[in-house]
Amino acid sequence: MPLQIDPTARISKLADIEDSVRGTVIRIGARTVVDSFVKIKPAGGSGDVDIGENVTLNSGCVIYTGHGLTIGNNVAIAANCTFAPVNHAFEDRDKLIVDQGFQPSRGGITIGDDVWIGANCVFLDGAVVNTGCVIAAGTVVKGIVPAYLVIAGNPWRQVGERS
């Protein structure tokens, strides 16, 4: 079953969750809220999307399934964030970019428990945000963010730590 939504989750009628032609599973956990104009789009791989319990995805967020996305429990995601666990190939100048497909996976995206994500953040393939982090608005995240850090910017830098 490609779409698995817990009966206590609230999905806006204006959210757009597309079916996968590759069998990607999209799971949405208990008491999770998917707001209007959230888009979940299977593209660029066969990774599953697993959204935990008590997650809030605010308006305008876009999730590409790509190489997979896991969001832990008790995560708050502000408006207009993009999760892109996929990498377009572009190396061959003798081929059009649209004909080159995708690069190998860098591991998908993992967001730990108890994370706050500010508006307009972008998460790229291989991003790992560990437990308790705060991601400031507009931050571009790739690589590993250690637990309980407060980060901001592009490239991201530590601006604080939760005590």
Image: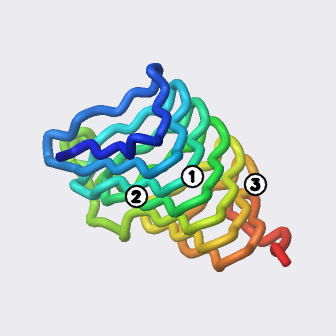
Residue at left offset 65%, top offset 64%: 114
The kind of residue tagged 1 is: Asn
Q: In this view, does 66 lie above or below 19?
A: below
Depth check, front residue: 43 or 131? 131
Q: Residue 136 carries which label?
A: 3
Q: Identify the residue position indicated by label 1 in the image.
A: 54
Farthest-out residue, left: 22
Farthest-out residue, front: 8
The CA distance from mark 2 to mark 3 is 20 Å
Give the label, 1 or 2, closer to the camera. 1
Q: Residue 69 carries which label?
A: 2
Labels 1 & 2 near each other (Cβ < 8 A): no
Residue 46 shown left or right of residue 63 in the figure? left
Helix, strand or loop at mark 1: loop
Q: In this view, does 127 lie above or below 95?
A: below
Helix, strand or loop at mark 3: loop
Residue at left offset 54%, top offset 72%: 143
